[in-house]
Image: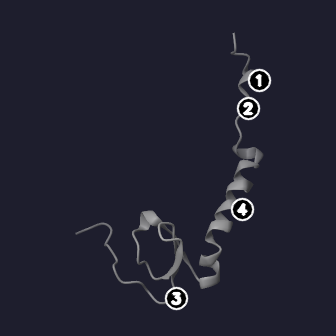
Amino acid sequence: MALFKKRTVGKPGEWYYCLEHKKVEEGPECPAKDRFGPYTTRAEAEHAMQTARDRNLEWENDPKWHDAPASATGDDD
């Protein structure tokens, strides 16, 4: 028995943003490696790239995700 089943037919109401074709799809039309989603609305899927940019910026500026600078360790001899 397969652990993950390949779903070829999309479900109505699931929206995806295809990174390959740069378009919104209802149901998964393209492979999972090429898409963001699922989103609950078409509008959310349309803004997928902006959402990703916003989240990346948040993470890049989150002090919890930054290591101490190398010079602070005293190992640069």
- Separation of disc 1 and disc 4 at Cα? 30 Å
Local secondary structure at mark 4: helix
Local secondary structure at mark 2: loop
- Separation of disc 4 and disc 3 at Cα? 25 Å
Please provide percent x and percent y for residue 39. 57, 78
- Horizontal side of residue 32 vs 44, given as left or right: left
Amino acid, disc 4: Asp
State which tag comes first along the sequence, 3 or 2: 3
The residue positioned 48% from the left and 71% from the top of the image is: 21
Q: Neighbour class for label 3 at 10 Å: few (<14), some, many (≥20)?
A: few
Which of the numbered marks, if any, corresponds to residue 72? 1
The foreground one among 24 and 11 is: 24
Which of the numbered marks, if any, corresponds to residue 68? 2
Please provide percent x and percent y for residue 66. 71, 40
State which tag comes first along the sequence, 3 or 1: 3
- Separation of disc 1 and disc 2 at Cα? 7 Å
Q: Is residue 41 above or below residue 64?
A: below
From the image, tell me which residue sits under label 3: 13
Q: Neighbour class for label 4 at 10 Å: few (<14), some, many (≥20)?
A: few
